[in-house]
Image: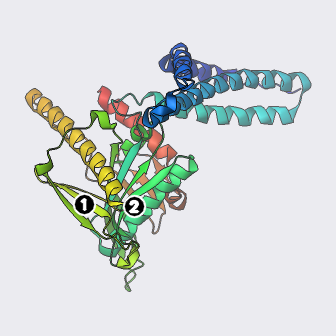
Amino acid sequence: MLELDLSADIQPLRHTFGDISEVVDVPRLREDIARLSEEAGAPDLWDDTERAQKVTSALSHRQSELARITGIAQRLDDLEVLVDLANEMGDEDSAQEARGELTALTDVINQLEVQTLLDGEYDDRSAIITIRSGAGGDDATDFAEMLMRMYLRWAENHKYPAKVMDTSYAEGAGIKSATFEISAPYAFGTLSVEAGTHRLARISPFGSADKRQTSFAAVEVIPLMEEAIAVEIPENDIRVDVFRSSGPGGQSVNTTDSAVRLTHLPTGIVVSMQNEKSQIQNRAAAMRVLQTRLLLLQKEEEAAKKKELAGNITASWGDQMRSYFLYGQQLVKDLRTGQESGNPAAVFDGDLDDFISAGIRWRKRRDDD
């Protein structure tokens, strides 16, 4: 007779899910939905398009969050019913279905638990990612483009909208740099653990000696800030350069000088935008990113000053946070968390969730120490 007992696995899941539900605060979530629904139903809502978009976006996000919480609760109940049914009927097919659902629910609850760790000031915002090639010549610019595709594929896999804002193509292979936006709740908190220096080791496809080549690329992740909280920048602190948008190989894709480069003279921060249709749109997008970087720089300086006064200055990130080995033993390894994958092709195709989850847990432990 079939005796399927999954209680030892289901009860810890219920405990974890209970903790998550308390953090999410389901009653408050329902109150937010009621309030936002009332605002969304106002006849004059769309008189202010920007406010309307914020209200409807916030409502959609909270409705999705509530649906996910209630859906998981129902799945846990259904799983226990399925286990009872399998035992009563002696049905191995039902038992196999229950085991599969247990595995799936474990993954879902683990991912949700990770999201509850995202409690930073800007963690709930969308993310702006900038990738820059480092040392390594053509291999480095090619690697930078591989990383860009990796994050865009990750966004696509999760059905998150992504928008390329600026790309500087290399004369040979790949890109010198690229900036793109991933729009999703908690995109910044989730992807911020990807910031740092990435290293690629492989047999170079650009050399004739079949020698191993090591190359580097830097990943920067900043939150997309609301204009209302952006810092004010005096006009005389900015140099504005306009130029013609270009694609691979320097070919013009625009007959007007619509691309914009902003240089913040006091700090030397440079932001370029070229993917909008007009110079005005590119300048507005570049200014928003520049304001965000200056705000974060200000906060970093304040935090560094506090640490200096406390006599405890430590680097938050090492020079290298992840290595990708594409020769011999195929391996991707995170040097902070120890997370590994023996399938680099899948990682470069956007399979990053395990690395991101491990990074978020690692950061939480580090911050709690």
Q: How crowded is mark 1: few (under 14 residues within 10 Å), some or many (20 or more)?
A: many
Residue drawn at point x = 30 percent, y = 69 percent? 257
User: Picture coordinates of residue 87 (x, y %)?
Assistant: 85, 23
Q: Is residue 55 visible?
A: yes
Q: Give the camera-side residue of 214 and 268.
A: 268
The quarter of the displayed image where residue 230 is located: top left
Q: In which quarter of the image is the C terminus?
A: top left
Query: What amino acid type should be assigned to the residue bearing mark 2?
Result: Asn
The outermost residue toward the bottom is 208
Disc marking residue 261: 1
Q: Give the camera-side residue of 247 and 87.
A: 247
The quarter of the displayed image where residue 249 is located: bottom left
Provide the residue designation for mark 2.
275
Q: Do the residues labelled 2 and 1 touch (CB within 8 Å)?
A: no
Q: Is mark 2 on a helix, strand or loop?
A: loop
Residue 42 sits above or below residue 218 on the image: above
